[in-house]
Amino acid sequence: MDTFDYIIVGAGAGGFMLAEALGKDPFFKGKTILLLDKDSKSNNDRTWCFWENGMGDFDDILHKSWNNIYFGGPTYDARLDIAPYSYKMVRGIDFYSAYKNKIASYSNIAFRTDTVLDIEDRDQHVLVRTENTVYTAKKVFNSILDYKVLKAQTKYPLLQQHFIGWFIKTDKPVFDMDQATFMDFSIPQKGNTRFMYVLPFSETEALVEYTLFSESLLPEAEYEEAIATYIKEQLQCDAFTILEKEKGNIPMTCFDFNVFNSKNLLHIGMAGGWAKPSSGYTFRYAWKKTKLLVSYLKKDKPLHHFSKKDRFWYYDLLLLDILHRDNHKGESIFGTLFKNRSPQLIFKFLDEETNLWEELKIITACPIIDFTKALLRRVF
């Protein structure tokens, strides 16, 4: 039986970020750390995007960044300069490669490929059973999400941000490579919140993605038909090649993920509620949570006391209540918000870095009747 001080289950963004943060902090130099994943992380299985004010910790592995975004739809339609922010993209393979190299440089961290079957907190230590062995650790951080639990509970609304994207190369110049399409609601909504998302890498190459905020997934053919229609009708392009495809599904919920945690076991990443409930953005949110967690570990407090609700949790809850009840209202809510407030203030709010006065400006820029009704339903 192998014993470690810390075991991190899952080498996604949250798992790698935590392992690297512990490795480079002198406080944890004497701690043994194991990072476990069923996959070797050698494939480009996803992309992460985020906005950031100025330079950042991931600039050396960026695939592309944009200084302008496009927001489109019946309520509002505009090209927006987002300076001093930029919209940044990291490919999965570039992130994995960089972070595997980083943790390999720390002698107290091991990365092993194995499938985790069970995790059990036994008060004095945690057992992690895999297909090949049993490990013990003083603290375990688990990023495996149990979607079934989220779907079974009814206290908090659960939407899914689900999407399929095509990486395409066109036969003629089509894209403005200096502008990312952030949300284009010009497509049929069909009773949901649906938009197109386009990240151009050159005038002839881009990721074109069909995204929904809704309760249920679609047949894959419906996503792909929507992408093909958008390329033909909106981009005026008939000839293109599909280079790669990606798909994903991110939970959008204010569910209390802390119920999964215990004294020595903490869920991280999407499994710990580290995806921003109102937007689904996870990458930079996980980076900020990781920094807080590393500081918290130095205090040697029970892990289930780490997570706390704040006022931003309540803002997210009201939006999800509205979209869960009236899923078609996403276009009007986001359109009204971007029409009335600058993208810089919106990004700052979504980053949870605003003060109360700035938050009041955001709230009053949204359809106030919908949010008032949602608040009253929660109160009463």
Image (cartoon, grey):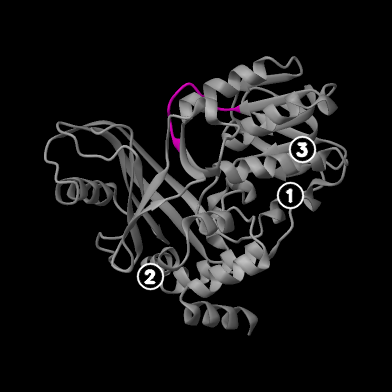
Is residue 346 rendered to the left or right of residue 354? Answer: left
Q: Name which residue lies at 53% across and 54% down.
A: 347
Helix, strand or loop for the magenta stretch, by majority: loop
Q: Nearer the viewer, residue 287 or 125?
A: 287
The quadrant of the picture occupied by the N terminus is: top right
Is residue 164 rendered to the left or right of residue 41? Answer: left
Q: Residues within 10 Å of mark 2 (few under 14, many from 20)?
A: some
Element type where label 3 sits in the image: helix
What residue does disc 2 label?
Answer: 332
Front: mark 1 or 3: 3
Q: Position of residue 369 (x, y in %)?
A: 48, 82
Q: Name which residue lies at 68% across and 45% down.
A: 289
Q: Name which residue lies at 52% across and 59% down.
A: 346
Marks 1/3: CA–CA distance? 17 Å
Q: In the rendered image, is residue 39 in sight?
A: no
What residue does disc 3 label?
Answer: 294
What segment carries the magenta color? 37-47
Residue 69 image label: none
Residue 240 shown in magenta = no
Which amino acid type corresponds to the residue marked 3 in the rendered image?
Val
Is residue 164 rendered to the left or right of residue 158? Answer: left
Front: mark 2 or 1: 2
What residue does disc 1 label?
Answer: 261
Front: mark 3 or 2: 2
